[in-house]
Image (spheres, grey):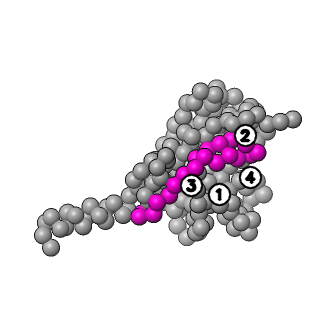
Amino acid sequence: MTDVDLKIAGAINQYKTECHGDLENGFFIKEERITFRKTELFDGQVAVMLPEHFADMPIQLQEIKYPSVHRPQIIKTNEAGDINFAFSLLDSPLEKEAVRETTRQMKKLIRKVQPSNVFHDEGIVEKENTAIGWFDYKSPAIDEPLFNLMYCASVNGKTLQGVFNAPYAEWKIWKGIMIDVVGTIECVKRAEG
């Protein structure tokens, strides 16, 4: 092989292990195209861009992956069950101004419950009618560590909590995508009643 051939082969192999694209047109992740669509949750109160081929996680798998009775209310997963988007809409009031402090308290609680987690970044996505606070961390798991990105937002005065997790080996691929996904969260309509 020539030097040029080696460079081309290296570029192809790098392309196969990285992520390319955007939410509007889809991402190529390890040679698989993942397209996203606007998905309404909680009877249309919340909308967010999620992968089109992700489906509701079966109850049996939920009970294994999220053994607490306080597991997320909605869990969307890929076919392998190793990449998950999970959401809960809590009746606890949360105003836009309190999102930053609520995010810090969530992080503090997770750190206290599982001190072996390794925390990385945190941020706030400002939107017209809400703010979304997020942080990411590495957590131990039975077979391999997980990459987690947790977030919260004020939705019609309620608290939207979300968590994303994937194998930690894929954190570089998913982190940027997840910050984009978090930025698509929007209040669609007020709950009736």
Crowd around label 3: few <14 · some 14–19 · many ≥20 (10 Å): many
Say whether residue 70 is magenta: no
Give the residue number, with chain letter if any, for mark 3. 51
Which of the two marks, 3 or 1, is nearer to us in this view? 3
Report the front residue among 178 and 104. 178
Q: Contact, CB < 8 Å: mark 4 with mark 2?
A: no
Quadrant of the rendered image containing residue 190: top right
Amino acid carrying mark 4 in the image: Gln
Residue 73 circle label: 4
Which of the two marks, 1 or 2, is nearer to us in this view? 2
Report the front residue among 123 and 158. 158
Q: Is residue 131 above or below residue 56?
A: above
* Image quarter of the C terminus: top right
In space, the residues marked 3 and 2 are separated at their CA atoms by 19 Å
Give the residue number, with chain letter if any, for mark 2. 45
Mark with earlier residue (3, 1): 3
Residue furthest to the left in view is 2
Q: Position of residue 111 (x, y in %)?
A: 60, 48
Q: Secondary structure beneath disc 2?
A: loop
Q: Residue at x 60, y 32 (%)?
A: 131
Q: Which residues are magenta?
A: 30-49
Q: Position of residue 19 (x, y in %)?
A: 41, 55
Which of the two marks, 4 or 2, is nearer to us in this view? 2
Crowd around label 1: few <14 · some 14–19 · many ≥20 (10 Å): many
Amino acid carrying mark 2 in the image: Gln
Which of the two marks, 4 or 3, is nearer to us in this view? 3
Quadrant of the rendered image containing residue 143: bottom right
Q: Contact, CB < 8 Å: mark 1 with mark 2?
A: no
Residue 76 circle label: 1
Mark with earlier residue (3, 2): 2
